[in-house]
Amino acid sequence: MSDEDKAAYRDDKLEHTPPATVEEEKRLVRKLDRAILPITCLLYLLAYLDRSNLGNARLQGLPQEILGGDPTGLLYEWVFSAFYFSYILFQVPATVLSKLFHPSYWIATMAIGWGICSTLQASAFNLAGIIVCRVGLGVFEAGFGPAIPLYFSLFYTKNELGLRLGYWFGFAAIAGAFGGLIAFGVQLIHFGPDSESDWKILFLIEGIPAIILGVVTWFALPNRPESTHLFDERERQIALERGARGTKADVGLVINKKHVIAALTDWRILACGTIYFGVNCALASISAFLPTIIKTFGYTNALAQLLTVPPYVVGAAVLCMTAYATDRLQSRGLAIASSCAAGAIGYLLVILVPSNMHVRYFAVFLITSGTYTAIGVIIAWFAHNLGSETKKAAGIPLFMAIGQCGSVLGANIYPSSDGPRYLRGFTITCALMAWATVCAVILYVSYRRDNKRRDELYGKPDPDATVDTSELADKAPMFRYIP
């Protein structure tokens, strides 16, 4: 069926579909959750394990075995940053290109690709080898992460999207917890002379499952609502009607070039990118250096790995609760500002309280909770506020790409020579989180003012009415932002 036929089929179904009952819709959402969330959440858990396990490998002999000891820590920073160079460059083109493929095939290919690259890290024997693996990992993960919010928006309404994306991104925090537990277990294997090669086992344990799950995804993940085999005819009608609530834009395997240009020139996406820059600097700092930082509290390597677990678990819980609240309130800007402020306070405590380990460990909880919550809610915020599929496909990876530059910064401001206090890294990250707080408030006010102006000019729309965003995307007169 051509894209024009699919669009005509969708419009015909919308015209002749009797309204769904509350029970029918709840039943459909439960079916979607069962089919989509387990696979995508597990994929993100594995993706995040594979990108962040370098921080654990650092304490398990990797620098000593393939980086010549790396006494300054600079080689490790380059290895960690290599992932982000390719991840940043490929996000926008990969996500726009993903609209031309069935979601299950695209996501499965990305998962198999990054799983292979992650597993091959175990075979690296010098700096060049592990950097090549990290670059490949970034290329494939660039095609996965930004594509998931776009994919979720095909099935879930704006009142459901925040919590589902919260669940999904919460698995990044769970990955941090699992990473610490797995690294603690691997530390006890004692592989190689003096346990110096434990890091190879770590890469194998965390890389191979992504390949296996990628194969499962190819066959099990639902495709677009108009073409998936998951639905019977009535469920398809309801899913198409739900997808038309609030927006009616490009449908099928197509790209709207005007919306790509609109995304690249939208100041709000750039402002969101600055928020994402700050929180990703903090996130990269956590991923790469949390075990090392906790070790500076005076604990052994193994115990430092284990103590990374509770902050990640709390971060995931806070993210899910906040995502649920923002779905109910249909407002996300102030929640993001509050989360960024909590992270800034956490870094400030680490800077100002150098000797009280209990306060510093509490500060780690503030940092993880604030950082993970801000990122998860931001993704849900812009998954609606960009209006059309193509603008989302270009805009979401654009602000993510800007933000991932913060990850590169975060990976390069904690050299070993700055230990044990790492004042430079903590100060820079604290300032960026504070600036992110300000930007979130600016965007919140901007969205509220724009909504008010449109209400005055065009009247208040029915929240469930279909708004034609095919030409103007989020600038359509009857489209309303989530502030």
Image (cartoon, helix red, strand yellow):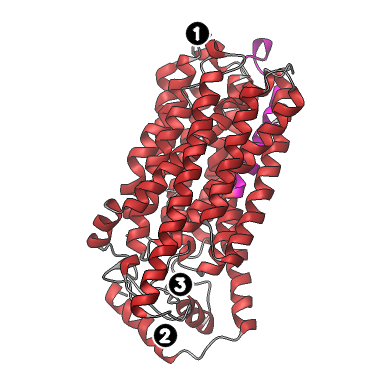
Q: Residue at label 3? A: 225
Q: Residues within 10 Å of mark 2 (few under 14, many from 20)?
A: some
* Left or right position of 23 against 425: right
Residue 121 visible in the picture: yes
In this view, the residue in front, 481 or 312, is 481
Circle number at residue 14? 2
Question: Which quadrant of the rendered structure holds the N terminus?
Answer: bottom left
Residue type highlighted by circle 1: Gly
Residue stretch in magenta: 170-196
* SS assignment at label 3: loop
In space, the residues marked 3 and 2 are separated at their CA atoms by: 13 Å
Q: Residue at label 1? A: 68
Name which residue lies at 55% across and 60% down.
162
Percent from the top left, x then y, of residue 382?
44, 57
Residue type highlighted by circle 2: Leu
Residue type highlighted by circle 3: Pro
Compared with 367, 477 (above or below) is below
